[in-house]
Amino acid sequence: MKKLFLIGIILSAMGFRYAEAQENSASKSITNISFKEKHYDLDEIKPGEIRELEYHFTNIGKHPLVIEQIIPDCECIIIPEEQIKQIMPGETGTLTVLYRAPKRVKGEKNHSIIIVTNTPRKKEKLGFTVHFASKPVISKKNNEMEKNDYAYISKGKNAKEKSEAYQKNEYKKVNEKPNKWKETEEKELKYIENQKKVAEKEAEQMERMKEKAEKERIKQMKEREKAEKEKAKIKRQAEKEAEQMERMKEKAEKERIKQMKEREKRIKQLEKEKKEAEKARKKAEKKQKKAEKEKERIEKIKEKINKRKADIEKIERKIAKKQKKLEKLTAKGKLSPIEIEKKKKEIQELKEKKLKLEQKIRKLERKL
């Protein structure tokens, strides 16, 4: 039983240490982050314009800060590849975001960026609001079309026609010189080429980020699989130990039942011996009492015998005294025949009395 108790204490201590290690390993990866600014307002953004935003933050926890993933809500938000990194406690970092405005938008729009980190909240939300520039108009001075991507300009029929022509890349219209349209076309082509290069660069960056994210995902999957295997191994080990404990418990239970049966058997044997001893004691006491009674009876008989013998001796003395007196008086002739006969009768009565006493003594002696 002592061994079983010690094994139970050891296993409970092992389980406590394992749970404590798991808790410590989980708590070691948790830290905190503080942002200098979480939201920006971008004013007067033109269609196709690219703006750069910087979010400054500090690791205010006691453990390294890991930026696991950055999730923008729009393809117009570009996250450079080098943003996913680790920040040590007390250090500051900067998250750089590139925003490329669409070509056909107006008014304002809100965007958000989710950062997945090893903080208690797991996810941090950043954002910015875009205020797009007002609609472009045709210059009244030289009647030229300003460079824009808007689909419609509301002032004047001529302006509407120029706007539609500009959208269809038809660079010829009234009141405009041909060389002016050519310059506009060349500028537009350069602009489009630049935009294509920027888009290709962004696509390459996105592809690299996707590849890195995929690698990170595969790495995390492998780590999870490894953790699952380790967990399964620990579980199997725990089940094995539990089975061993169960077998030990069953063995200990059998041993306890066996000892209990043996103890009950010994108790029954002792009770039986005790009953027999009690019976023998009572029998001996009964025998002793009987012997004492017998002894008392014999003593009483002996007392009676001695008393009878004493009575006989008295009677014999009386008889002897009376005979002597009778002989003396008879010799002197002082007694008449009647008196002599009377005296003899008295002596005879004493002799009969003596004989009766002797008979009683014999009876009493037979009882001994």
Image (tube, rainbow, N blue to C red):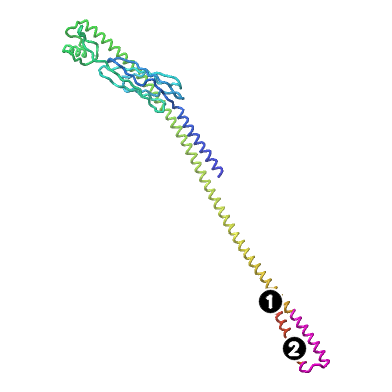
313 inside magenta stretch: yes
Horizontal and vertical percent position of residue 67? 40, 23
Q: Earlier in the sequence, mark 2 or mark 1?
A: 2
Q: Indicate which label's residue lies in the foreground, 2 or 1.
A: 2
Corner quadrant of residue 296: bottom right
Q: Residues within 10 Å of mark 2 (few under 14, many from 20)?
A: some
Judge whether 366 appears above or below 156 on screen: below
Task: Indicate the secondary structure of the residue bearing disc 1.
Answer: helix
In the image, 260 versus 353, the foreground residue is 353
Question: Disc 2 marks which residue?
Answer: 346
Amino acid, disc 1? Lys
Report whether 284 appears left or right of 252.
right
Question: Disc 1 marks which residue?
Answer: 367
Horizontal and vertical percent position of residue 14? 51, 36
Query: Which residue is situated farthest in the left direction here?
Result: 157
Amino acid, disc 2? Glu
Corner quadrant of residue 321: bottom right
